[in-house]
Amino acid sequence: THFGFETVSEEEKAERVYQVFESVAQKYDVMNDAMSLGVHRLWKDALLHVMNPSPGTRLLDTAGGTGDISFRFLEYVRSQEARRAWRAAPSHQTPSWQQISASYQTGRLGTGDGALAVVCDINKQMLKVGRQRAVDLGFSTGLSWVVGNAEELPFDDDSFDIYSIAFGIRNVTHIEQALQEAHRVLKPGGRFLCLEFSRVSNPLLSRLYDTYSFQLIPVLGEVIAGDWKSYQYLVESIRRFPDQEEFKALIEDAGFYKVQFHNLTGGVVAIHSGFKL
Ligand code: SAM
């Protein structure tokens, strides 16, 4: 298999991917903002928009790292719950929308009707940073942190309403196996969602993007995180990942139905989705 553009054994790839995230964990969130100029936040918001979860949903956020998708998920379901409570209140003046919304966001009121986000990641260090962020952001309920491999998930069959994986699947050694595991742990009717770097089709944008990512990202990695190699791997792993149509076919092969994708930023990133019947 490959680690970036290097040919390595499968065990070695898994080990090296582990080391990359072990080494970037503390700086991971700062680096995401720096490398994408903050745009990763919009891509993640777009994923939530497509997901559109309702209160009571059980989400498995695989390769969930420091929790970005799960935090957005809880904010989303809680704001829906807050909206409901506000509409049901006798007067729209007391409490104000701002008061009620803030109480729900911090988990002081409501839990998204028992909504749960399970953040599963192979790397303890990433989860540790995520747990601390959850405390800092004031999330007290609705989150669970589990160390686990996307290729061999530590969950029962038919357990989740939604499976998400954001910028994670390209790091997995056996993509097909991870997709089969996603299918196994989803309930019938459950939804698979993947946010991942993909292929830019516009030649001009593609040239610009190549120059930016190959020449600038490793430099930013060195300057901000003191880690050229990890960021070079990240860029190379993006180039190795299947394009939109190839990845769609892999998802269908794993047994999902109604598989589709939406490109974001001209295909720099794509959201793939599908259902388990
Ligand atoms: N989803 C988060 C986000 O969007 O910010 C984190 C993405 S980060 C680029 C990739 C994550 O995938 C890392 O936290 C890494 O530890 C995790 N990862 C890599 N291989 C994995 C595997 N086989 N199973 C589970 N997680 C894995």
Image: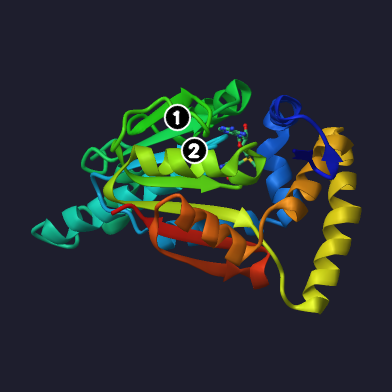
Q: Position of residue 18 (x, y in %)?
A: 69, 27
Q: Compared with residue 3, is residue 247 higher up or lower down, i.e. above or below?
A: below
Which of 192 and 76 lies nearest the eye of the viewer?
Answer: 192
Q: Residue under circle 1?
A: 153
Query: Who's the residue at 71% across and 31% down the image?
Result: 17
Left/right of residue 202 with respect to residue 223 in the rendered view: left
Question: Between disc 2 and disc 1, whose residue precedes?
Answer: 2
Disc 2 residue crowd, few under 14, some 14–19, many 20+, Cα 10 Å: many
Q: Position of residue 105 (x, y in %)?
A: 35, 44
Q: Residue under circle 2?
A: 62
Query: Who's the residue at 88% across and 62% down the image?
Result: 211
Which of 118 and 30 lies nearest the eye of the viewer?
Answer: 118
Q: Compared with residue 12, is residue 234 higher up or lower down, i.e. above or below?
A: below
Q: Secondary structure at mark 2?
A: strand
Q: Are marks 2 and 1 in contact (CB under 8 Å)?
A: yes
Q: Amino acid at mark 2?
A: Thr
Q: Position of residue 126 (x, y in %)?
A: 61, 28
Disc 1 residue crowd, few under 14, some 14–19, many 20+, Cα 10 Å: many
Asked whether the viewer can see residue 42, the reply is no
Q: Secondary structure at mark 1?
A: loop
Disc number for residue 70: none
Q: Amino acid at mark 1?
A: Leu
Find out if the beta carbon at label 2 lies less than 8 Å from the nearest ligand 1 atom: yes
Q: On the rendering, which quadrant does ligand 1 occupy?
A: top right
Q: Compared with residue 59, is residue 19 higher up or lower down, i.e. above or below?
A: above
Q: Residue furthest left?
A: 90
